[in-house]
Image (cartoon, rainbow, N blue to C red):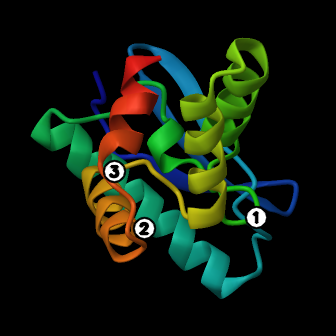
């Protein structure tokens, strides 16, 4: 459980979010430089989001929802789908990987998934893609 709000700290000139969860320290890194006001604001927003989710009972204990994306993409999801496509060699898995790669935006929250579904509809793609991902 989170007793105190997370805080932004200076880690040798790099921004870092620190939080104490169930008696252990956890950190979110790669947020930018300590002297960058935009990065500071982003880090404060991450702290606020974590604290809000903790108060609402919706905290992602893996903290993955709050970590910054690499090049604007959720690398873990794309890498996992690519590996699954190579392993299974099923057309629907390969198609799901290619569509999500083309979509190019993160999928961490319900709103982002809704945005994907709206984009798929606009592209003329069916909802079967989401079923293909869930089914594997």
Quarter-wise, where is residue 43 in the image? bottom right
- Residue 53, percent across and down? 24, 44
Q: How many other residues sit within 10 Å of disc 3, few (<14), some (14-19) or many (≥20)?
A: few
Q: Position of residue 130 (x, y in %)?
A: 36, 40
Which SS class for mark 3?
Answer: loop
Viewer-side label of 2, 3: 3
Q: Answer whether residue 104 is visible to the viewer in this image.
A: no
Task: Indicate the quadrant where residue 31 lies.
Answer: bottom right
Query: For the residues carrying marks 2 and 1, which lies nearer the camera in this image?
Result: 1
Q: CA distance from mark 1 to mark 3?
A: 18 Å
Residue where numbered disc 3 is placed: 109
Q: Quadrant of the N terminus?
A: top left
**Where does label 2 land, which residue?**
45
Q: What is the x, y in percent for residue 11?
A: 79, 51
- Answer above or below: position of 125 versus 25: below
Q: Residue furthest right?
A: 12
Sequence order check, earlier mark of 1 and 3:
1
Seen from the viewer's position, the closer of residues 52 and 94 is: 94
Residue picked out by circle 1 = 71
> Which residue sits at x=62%, y=31%?
91
Q: Residue at x 38, y 25 (%)?
A: 134
Question: Can you tell which mark lies on residue 110?
Answer: none
**Percent x, y for residue 39?**
65, 75
Q: Earlier in the sequence, mark 2 or mark 3?
A: 2
Toward the viewer: 79 or 128? 128
Q: Residue at x 57, y 52 (%)?
A: 100
């Amino acid at each position: 459980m989170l007793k105190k709000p997370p805080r932004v700290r200076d880690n040798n000139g790099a921004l870092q979010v620190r939080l104490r969860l169930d008696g252990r320290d956890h950190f979110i890194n790669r947020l930018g430089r300590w002297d960058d006001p935009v990065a500071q604001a982003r880090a404060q927003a991450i702290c606020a989001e974590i604290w809000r989710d903790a108060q609402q009972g919706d905290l992602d204990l893996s903290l993955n929802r709050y970590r910054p994306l690499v090049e604007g993409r959720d690398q873990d999801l794309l890498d996992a789908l690519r590996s699954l496509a190579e392993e299974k060699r099923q057309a629907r898995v390969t198609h799901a990987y290619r569509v999500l790669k083309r979509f190019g935006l993160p999928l961490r929250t319900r709103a982002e998934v809704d945005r994907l579904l709206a984009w798929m509809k606009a592209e003329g793609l069916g909802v079967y893609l989401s079923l293909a991902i869930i089914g594997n």
